[in-house]
Amino acid sequence: MRLCIKIAGTMQFRRLEFCVAASWARRFSFLLLFILFATFAPAVAQSANSERRVQKLYQEAKAAEAQGNNQAAVAKYEEMLTIAPNLGAAYNNLGALYVRTGDYAKAADVLKKGLKVNPEMPSASALLGIALFQMGDYENATKPLEAALRANPKDGNAELMLAKDLMHLQELDAAATHLRQIAQREPDNSEVFYLLGQVHMQLSEKALARLNQIDPKSVYVHEVSGDVMASMKNWDGALVEYKKAVEVAPLQAGTHYKLGDAYWNLNQWDAATQEFNSELINDPNDCMARWKLGNILLQQRVQPELALDNVNRAITLCPKLMQARVDRARALVMLNRQSEALPDLTAAEQADPQEASIHFLLGQVYRALGRQQDAQAEMKIFGSLEESSRAAAAEKAKQVLETKENAH
């Protein structure tokens, strides 16, 4: 009787087949076990040694990073990859080090290799996008940044870098979309709002250039030019363009309002009043023009009844126009109808608690109604907000002066 024993090896070993007599089977099985152990034991031992070495190098690399010795850390990661060339995390960490030290070309090379080993590394994709962006390779930076963002849609750093990349590629609408998304998550991120302003400015410039190509004498050319100047608080420059717009299209809704608004911002009340009235002839439902007619009377502290009528009509047209509600309260205070002013002011305070003038008015109303404690609380808030505003203005003025001095 014969017994066939089949042993399937791994890797480069071929299948071994031994057929022996049944009486020799047990004896021969011990021989086979000895052969297999002698064959695989060194490989297993070598693998274990490699793992220990890689772990030791990793610990040494992290220790070097913690000490600020980036050069030593780089050397450890590079040695690690010679031992374990398929270790994706090592490529990621080495790439991050290169990005941190500003060696973007090496970072890009290492990160590309790492993503070939393991494409599912969002951090490596983000780092690759950053490295390529810093190298000025904006077209190739887009794809890895988008991959990183798909893997983690709330990665603000990757999304901000992608928005910057798209701005360089003049894909302004897409950049604006990403910046708005970040702004919703990070409402106090000043860089995001600065970039968003830059995008809109570039879009306005492009629109204006295109308008000039289509029809350089168009009313819209003058309106957009005026809008750009108005956005920079250059009201005198805006005035020139808005006047031209009125000359081109005196019966078009909006032209007289924009001109009136420029006069209003320059405190030229009579000219502003004339333009707002002209706007209401073209568009009787313009609540902004109606509100500002009332506001002008309040600024001049005349005819509070007519001012109240105007702001009431503005609120009827636009119930959520909070500035009109504040002005209605002002008119009512001037008419000694403080109790009627209170609902508008409390609503305005909830809508914009950082507006100092609302707290001042509330303080006056509470005092007139005999609510002294509430009046004191509102005046305290008013004083605090005014002090903060003055401090911010002083700091801004200081920065402007320092900038001018440094320029010289």
Image (cartoon, rainbow, N blue to C red):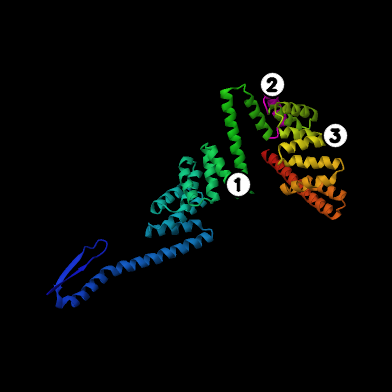
Residue highlighted by disc 3 = 303
Question: Can you tell which quarter of the image residue 288 is in?
Answer: top right
The residues bearing labels 1 and 2 have C-alpha atoms spaced at a distance of 40 Å
Between 220 and 198, the residue placed more toward the observer is 220
- Which residues, given as a range, are shown in magenta? 232-253
Q: Could you tell me if the residues under marks 1 and 2 are in contact, i.e. CB atoms within 8 Å?
A: no
Residue highlighted by disc 2 = 247
Q: Earlier in the sequence, mark 3 or mark 2?
A: 2
- Around disc 1, counting alpha carbons within 10 Å, would you say few (fewer than 14), some (14 to 19), or many (20 or more)? some
Extreme residue toward the front, this view: 316
The residues bearing labels 3 and 2 have C-alpha atoms spaced at a distance of 32 Å
Query: Of discs 1 and 3, which sits in the foreground?
Result: 3
Q: Residue at x 76, y 28 (%)?
A: 277
Where residue 38 appears, as percent x and y from the top left, is: 26, 71
Q: Residue at x 86, y 50 (%)?
A: 369
Q: Amino acid at mark 2?
A: Glu
Residue 178: in magenta span: no
Residue 307 seen in the current view: yes
- Around disc 3, counting alpha carbons within 10 Å, would you say few (fewer than 14), some (14 to 19), or many (20 or more)? some
Where residue 58 appears, as percent x and y from the top left, is: 45, 62
Residue 265 seen in the current view: no
Vertical arrangement, residue 132 with respect to residue 50, above or below: above
- Around disc 2, counting alpha carbons within 10 Å, would you say few (fewer than 14), some (14 to 19), or many (20 or more)? few
Between 64 and 372, the residue placed more toward the observer is 372
Extreme residue toward the left, this view: 1
Vertical arrangement, residue 363 with respect to residue 404, above or below: below
Query: Of discs 1 and 2, which sits in the foreground?
Result: 2
Q: Amino acid at mark 1?
A: Ala
Where residue 399 appears, as percent x and y from the top left, is: 70, 44
User: What label sits on residue 145 in the rendered view?
Assistant: none
